[in-house]
Image (spheres, grey):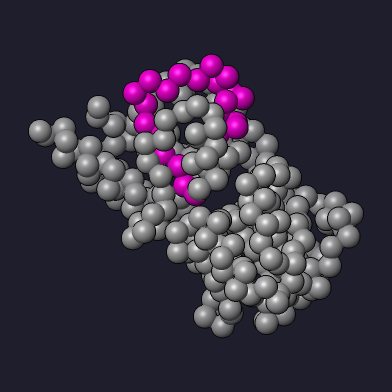
Amino acid sequence: MKIKKILVSQPQPTTEKSPYYDIIDKYSVKIDFRPFIKVEPISAKEFRSQRINITDHTAIIFNARHGIDHFCHLCEELRVTVPETMKYFCVSETVALYLQKYIQYRKRKIFFSQTGKFSDLAVLLNKHAEEKFLYITSDVRNEETMSILENAKINFDQAIMYRTVSNHISEEEVKDYDMLVFFSPAGIKSLLESVPNMEQGDRFIASFGSTTAQAVHDAGLRLDLEAPSPGVPSMTMALDNFLKEIKKNGRK
């Protein structure tokens, strides 16, 4: 099957240098960008009700770039000065590099999973068990990651700093695409809420992150492309390789 139209469940890139545009030119495909979820901040009052003191912690755990945005914005709103000694543990290199938007990356102690899997990040956390961790999350409890943290030999608190809301998409719109690309379990949840009788057929599904991949499987859908993987840290690299293989097989 040829892939002509791809739906990426993220906002449109703000720069023309995005690798997605290279893929469009290289493979003559149309890529539309549309988030399946909307992320909304919680108020300072809502955060205070959790009775969490950020500076009581020595390390922060990030599972998504949204978490970094809302953590930094809340710290600014609450006038919390995060010490330079704070350590950061991220689920993937992509998430870790996003910290550069807010801090001087090279001057901070930043750790990330080489595989993009939360279970492998937990191995790193256990090596720093003397830290007091703060895990930044949305209002949607991720049972897998919470189970991993609870089974790890670490001291941590969970801090809800943003909420996710479904962004409706019609069944007709979904059928218009040859491939759907997801970046969170909430995106899969939103798809099923919008199209409860989803029939995948020969439509390809790609996912980023182990928890997103698990959500695809749990929904009874076929997962055709999973990222990251060793040597392929980003979705754009994985997508490039996938389309290259599709193109090569189409010539046989």
Q: Position of residue 101 (x, y in %)?
A: 56, 67
Q: Which residue is drawn at 50% across and 27% down?
A: 220
Which image quarter is the C terminus in? top left
Q: Which residue is drawn at 74% across and 71% down?
A: 132
Q: Of residues 98 and 234, which is closer to you in this image?
A: 234
Range of residues picked out in magenta = 188-209
Q: Is residue 18 above or below residue 177?
A: below
Q: Does the magenta stretch include residue 112?
A: no
Q: In this view, does 198 lie above or below 134?
A: above
Q: Position of residue 230 (x, y in %)?
A: 36, 59
Can residue 70 be seen in this snapshot? Answer: no
Q: Residue at x 79, y 68 (%)?
A: 54
Q: In which quarter of the image is residue 250?
A: top left
Q: Position of residue 142 (x, y in %)?
A: 66, 45
Q: Quadrant of residue 219?
A: top right
Q: Residue at x 37, y 26 (%)?
A: 203
Q: Of residues 120 and 77, which is closer to you in this image?
A: 120
